[in-house]
Amino acid sequence: MAADRYLSRVLTVDLTSRRFQIEEREDLFEKYLGGVGVAIQLLKEACPKGADPLGPDNVIVLAVGPLTGLFPLASKTVALFKSPLTGNLGESHAGGRSAIAIKSAGYGAIVIKGVSRTPVYLSISMRGVEFKDASGIWGVRSSFTVGRVIRELELGAGVRTIMRIGRAGEKLIAFASVITETYRHFGRLGLGAVFGSKKLKAIVVRGNRSIPVTDPNEYRKLYEEIYRGAVESAVMKKYHDLGTAANVLPLNELKALPTRNLKNSYFEGAQEVSGENLAEKYLSRRVACAHCPVACIHLAALREPYLDIAYFYKTVYVGYDYELIYALGSMLGVSNAHGLLKLIDEVDTVGLDAISTGVSLAWATEAFERGLITEHDLLGVRLRWGDWKAYVEAVKLLVERANGFYDTLANGVEEAAAKYGGFDYALTFAGNEMPGYHTGPAAYIGYLTGARHSHLDGAGYSIDEAAFKKGEKLTPRQIAELLLNEEAWRQILSSLVVCFFARGLYKPEVVVKALGTAGFQLSMEQLKNLGFEILKVKQAYKIQEGFNPETLKVPRRVEETPSPQGPILASAVKEGVRYYFELLGVQSHMKEVGQG
Amino acid sequence: MISVVKRLSIIDVERCTGCQLCMFACSRRFGVGGMGQSRILVRSAGGIERGFVVVVCRACLTPPCLKVCPVDAISQRPGGGVIVDPSTCIGCHRCEEACPFGAVMWDQAMNKPMICFHCGYCSQFCPFKVIALEEVTTRS
């Protein structure tokens, strides 16, 4: 039995009726722990089949787990919803103070349903929910400003989270993000647009509850062990120093860094936008999510002159990470560090997912180059590789859905290619724009099979890199097996909820012990099986909602650009996809309806 | 009489990353997880990009919180700071209001103040050496 009975409290908020209720769902948390394991069950219960992601029936589930608030790096919240970008399962993880706040307020999960008549923001505490009028802050373009305003209005400084949308969420951009604590994001798959469709500008959660454990002495001892591992061991080192930006040069050396819409996989301008250079010239502060000793959030100080007054400057702080450097840097041919930071800042201000934005602009740049779209379509913004000023302008137009073209692009690359052409170089996988790794076939099999179409589902890039180092060539079946095993175990990490950066720390033996202090008695075998079960439930849900592994496409560009493993064959990728679903044992949609 | 006592000092607040591990450590010292029992508070200085503020008892030599207690539940700790006697305390909040740093935390469940007594457990978990137990020598 869980030592903390508040873990299994589920807060359901109905935006339509402006009511809330709290239920005990021990049945869910005892079986599925928390996080994604519980959230997928809650989503299935609350969201009707075939619900429109931007309609009133879509549901947002935010979930934390048994280790939240107890151990270092158990710092993330899982958000589950139907994605307006893919039309299917949306899953996004973020830290900041979100997880700690939700757990401290006395909830294991928060379910948000319905739609508000007028703009609203939620103020959630141990007492319940206040529906606060957001008509004044609706229309505030900058996610930074929204945070600054709400910070002054609400109690709980230091023990609260402020999750908010910028203009992009309000305008229902399919890849709009939700920003928390300024520099962390529920980035992918369009949670921001779901907020926007519900007229939900922000959610504030605060709390200061104590969390009981089974044995305080055992708990303190184990904590100290895990803490030492987090600050001393080599597994965490990469994130301490340069942050995720440390990946830029190594990936470039491997020739796996997607450049100029993946025309190349080596970026001659990588040095300037590398983690090393950004740290040397721009890094001004490192900050951390709550309960993380690493502080991987790297803030660059961007000093800018005003052109209309002499010697008049401002300094803004821009968070940078590998994915942003890839998507808004190499993918667009932007090698000017200052320009890259300005572009990141614009994207964060309006609240867009950086990866989807970069890949969409990359497609648009190539489409323009090839004459598929015109200067008229672009409203005069002549997109050119490396021209970050043009990209900043394009982002501004995209977020306003300024004309027919930007309106279409705002729904993602897949829809843009469907209307204008250029499928061969539309780098979207099951509707989600590609992450920054052109390492080999495993990366792409992973983008297609991963439940959230992320490089983090099964870490295909890591499988590719390991094979490359050993000089091995893995078969599609071997890759599928490795991806599946990794993704299944990560369901457990996402149920605790632990940040994947600590995956080297939270090995199965450690997880078993940590769960023990929270009152869960599970063996490593049981945990591993549970991971597979959760993954099956997620994939079955996706298939129910229309996901069809058999019709997945691999854009031609992937085959055209050589990877460190040589050319990638679409046929091999598709074979890997087939094996993955075969091994998982989830019937494909096609088979279910008796076709093929 | 010369007394050498230790107190929890903020060495350099600019090094703080806002990880709040000190807050979790303090609660853990009292046998629970979460931050509910924490006598130290870390919050942003108005936006995370502006850095952090670490709020904790400064071990005043003439504590204002002690001065305002109407029932003498707060007594002087040798070398600075205070000790609260919860069995005398009536939960009136005057000490909380009197502290200019906001370092008197409040235990909602018990309706009593929580004030750091400088054990230093939190400083063992600060990865960036923001806080440390320092010796304070006083003559009296």
Image (cartoon, coloured by chain):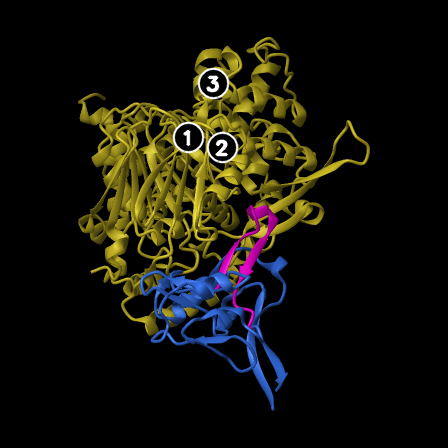
Chain colours: A yellow, B blue
Name the residue rendered at 35%, 32% in the picture: A575
| Number of the label disc, if any, that sits on residue A190 | 1
Labels 2 & 3 near each other (Cβ < 8 A): no
> What residue span does the magenta drawing correspond to?
B40-59
Q: Secondary structure at mark 3?
A: helix
Q: Amino acid at mark 2?
A: Asp
Q: Amino acid at mark 3?
A: Phe
Q: Secondary structure at mark 2?
A: loop
Any magenta on residue B57?
yes
Q: Quadrant of residue A508?
A: bottom left
Q: Which residue is mark 3?
A: A423
Q: Secondary structure at mark 1?
A: helix
Q: Which residue is mark 2?
A: A353
- Left or right of A371? Residue A172 is left
Q: Is residue A411 above or below residue A264?
A: above
Q: Amino acid at mark 1?
A: Gly
- Left or right of A527? Residue A207 is right
On the image, the x and y values in percent for residue B113 come to 41, 66
